[in-house]
Image (cartoon, rainbow, N blue to C red):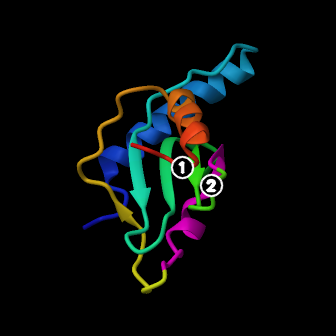
Amino acid sequence: MELLPHTVREQLAENGRINQARIAAGEDTIDFEPVVKFFTPDAGATWLLTEIDPEDPDITFGLCDLGLGFPEIGSVRLSEFCAVRGRLGLPVERDLHFTATVTLSTYAERARQAGGIVA
C-alpha cells in the first residue's frame, strides 16, 4: 500500500496552494476538512492532514496527536512522521476507511476535550 497516493497528495497540494494564495492576499485561510488520516497501529499517534506546503512538499499541515494527551494543530514533515515506529516497530499506516465529516478545527476541539483524536 502506498502511504500517500498521488490523488491524496494532489488534494493536499491544492489545499496548500489555496491557503497560500489567501495568505498572500491578506485573507483568512480556509478551515478544510482533513484529506487523510495516518496512525501508528501499535502506539497512540494519529495525524489528520489538510494540506501540503506548496514551497516544500515534505511539510504538511494538520492535527497531530502523539498519543500523549496534547493534540495540536501545526506542521509536520512527512519524512519525519513516516519514520515513526510504535512499540512493536510497526510503521505509520494510512486509514483507508477514514472520511472526514467536519473541519480540522472541529476535530481539534473534539480532540482537546477528549485528550486525543477521535475520528
Q: Let me know if residue 99 appears in the view.
A: yes
The crowd level at tag 1 (other Cα within 10 Å; few <14, some 14-19, many 20+) is: many
Q: Secondary structure at mark 1?
A: loop
Q: Secondary structure at mark 2?
A: loop
Q: Is residue 44 left or right of residue 28?
A: left
Residue 82 lies in the magenta stretch: yes
Residue 53 to residue 80: above or below: above
Q: Determine which residue is flagged by label 2.
A: 69
Q: Nearer the viewer, residue 19 or 109?
A: 109
Q: Quadrant of the N terminus?
A: bottom left
List x then y, in percent, for residue 23: 71, 23
List x then y, in percent, for residue 114: 54, 42
Q: Quadrant of the C terminus?
A: top left
**What kind of residue is marked 2?**
Gly
Residue 22 to residue 88: above or below: above
Going 52% across and 27% down the picture, which residue do you hit?
Answer: 106
Q: How many marks?
A: 2
Q: Determine which residue is flagged by label 1.
A: 116
List x then y, in percent, for residue 94: 34, 59
**What kind of residue is marked 1?**
Gly
The crowd level at tag 2 (other Cα within 10 Å; few <14, some 14-19, many 20+) is: some
Residue 90 lies in the magenta stretch: no
Q: Which residues are magenta?
A: 71-86
Residue 53 to residue 5: above or below: above
Dots 2 and 1: beta carbons under 8 Å?
A: yes
Q: Which tag, 2 or 1, sits closer to the chain's start?
A: 2
Going 30% across and 65% down the picture, which residue do you hit?
Answer: 2
Going 53% across and 76% down the picture, which residue do you hit?
Answer: 83
List x then y, in percent, for residue 46: 48, 56
Q: Is residue 79 left or right of residue 4?
A: right
